[in-house]
Image (cartoon, rainbow, N blue to C red):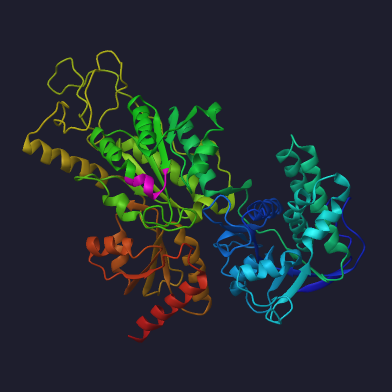
Amino acid sequence: MSTTVDGDLDGGNGALGGTRRTELRRLDRVVIRFAGDSGDGMQLTGDRFTSEAAAFGNDLATLPNFPAEIRAPAGTLPGVSSFQLHFADYDILTPGDRPDVLVVMNPAALKSNIADLPPGGMVIVNTDEFTKRNLSKVGYASDPLEDGSLDRYQVHKVAMATLTRGALEQTGLSKKDAERAKNMFALGLLSWMYHRPTEGTERFLREKFARKADIAEANILAFRAGWNYGETTESFAVTYEVAPAALPFGTYRQITGNTALAYGIVAAGQRSGLQVLLGSYPITPASDILHELSKHKNFGVTTVQAEDEIAGIGIALGAAYGGSLGVTSTSGPGIALKSEAIGLAVMSELPLLVIDVQRGGPSTGLPTKTEQADLLQAMFGRNGECPVPIVAPQSPADCFAIALEAARIALTYRTPVLLLSDGSIANGSEPWLIPDVDALPDLRVTFAAEPNALDGTDEHWPYVRDTETLAREWAIPGTPGLEHRIGGLEKADGKGNISYDPDNHDRMVRLRQAKVDGVEVPDLEVDDPSGKARVLVLGWGSTYGPIGAACRRVRNAGLDVAQAHLRHLNPFPRNLGDVLAAYDRVVIPEMNLGQLALLLRGRFLVDAISYTKVAGLPFKAEELQGVLTDHVKGVTAA
């Protein structure tokens, strides 16, 4: 749908706008990708556009993609950083398969991303960087802006660096410093094109550079210059509008997965009445959890940046021993280092949250790329029989709820809990419905207050268990009359004395396993609208969005497919076996080589069909649509 409107579109800021008439096209969704050098500010640009889309009321999902190096070689393919944003007037599940609009700041960004742009898509190019040297650096024999290779796209050539320097000429900034604001020029141009508000970005820039007023003003001038360029140039005859989404009533904010995890941990501390201590060593992509929690000392949160991974979990476990909610955060390599201490937490039966924000591996692997290949490590990556509950969020906003769920299990059952996020969830963002605090689960705990010896003596036995949960009592060290011993050596059931008795060890191993097996988790819900599906697609973690989007497409094509998603991976939901048995085929997409499928085959003897990807990028809905369509048609024809 398109209509013609007056071009005096100032986004609520009287300093911007003109009178040129443009055609306005109303769209239900748009995918934009900003791409440039890792020093071009593409992550900030994308984040600001995302914030304005959230403030406008769109539903949205984002996909940041950046190199692991702090500053990769300028103008090279490995140094390209991009930020993709999908915003819509309806509920969406993914950052989008392909961009509708590609903004590129140099030849490397164009070459890295142009293959993803569909024919007819729009390319906005910073022409200043298309020099002979920069073109040859990435293997272009000729200038793609002139040789016709981009003829199937809508190409808009904009000398962003030149125009930015011109806009900042009176500020006194050097040429180099002025050009650094070209990302704000691009943001201003896209904000004009999609009718985004401007006040929020200008306020953000003034706050971000509050101590450098000249830099703040330069960025604002560049942002306005981009807006006014769109308003006055004849190159852009069309603007676009995406209406707010009809989301459930409430107050929303844009949130990333790591921030949501941090808020969930704060909420868990408040709802349990416990002090929170995070012991952590910085590691990509989990470091933002440490950064965010360090801001919330007023909520009883203490953060310790430890000297290494082992120290981080040791500090957290010591806090748990002392009666606090202990938390440690890391990624896959850190889990390997923490494995012995996780075993100590299992043996001592103390509540502990262990957050693994998964990334590409093994070893250092792909620090800034996503993967979900730590499931088997989480299940079995410790010596001995060492069971731990495992939970996984399905989206950035879900991280808040899953943090509370992990805390519930840890505190109720006196056990470490592994929480498996991943890079796609951690760095991605979406609208989050801010919950009613009073409606959050009550996580209060009761500490041991008096001797509990089963033989009637005036002693505290640390391994006397609750008959329902099998959790042992939590006695704070130093409580008079409750002196006790815990540690890594096997303990006697009940009394807690060191024990090498074979029968006792057998009993304690089985008790620890039974405690984890008995963790109460909700039944698995299945989305099967027609009730006629014969194919079930089952996922976990960040595959939720692509699977859901693919299922929508398959159903829109007139085919039946069922979807279910696991947030509890150990123990599995009680009804999982029955769910699997109800379908002729079970397809499991994973960003690993089939780890969940392996577990389900072993546990339920189901012939689960793996569809795997380990490219450092999330699934696209279109690729899963093809896979599911083939399976639905295949089982129908069988």
Q: Is residue 334 magenta?
A: yes
In this view, the residue farthest toward the bottom is 637
The residue shown at (41%, 56%) is: 365
Q: Is residue 98 left or right of residue 175?
A: left
Vertical relation: 229 (above or below) 351: below
The residue shown at (38%, 50%) is: 332
Q: Is residue 211 left or right of residue 320?
A: right
Vertical relation: 454 (above or below) 504: above
Q: In the figure, residue 96 lies in which quadrant?
A: bottom right
Q: Main secondary structure of the magenta part?
A: helix
Q: Position of residue 291 (x, y in %)?
A: 54, 38
Q: Is residue 219 left or right of residue 402?
A: right
Q: Position of residue 216 (x, y in %)?
A: 77, 42
The residue shown at (50%, 56%) is: 424
- Give whichever of 437, 586 is nearer the camera: 586
The region drawn magenta spans 330-336
Q: Position of residue 292 (x, y in %)?
A: 54, 38
Q: Is residue 34 magenta?
A: no
Evaluate whether residue 469 shows in this view: no
Look at the image and tell me in which quarter the C terminus lies.
Answer: bottom left
- Give whichever of 470, 422 is nearer the camera: 422
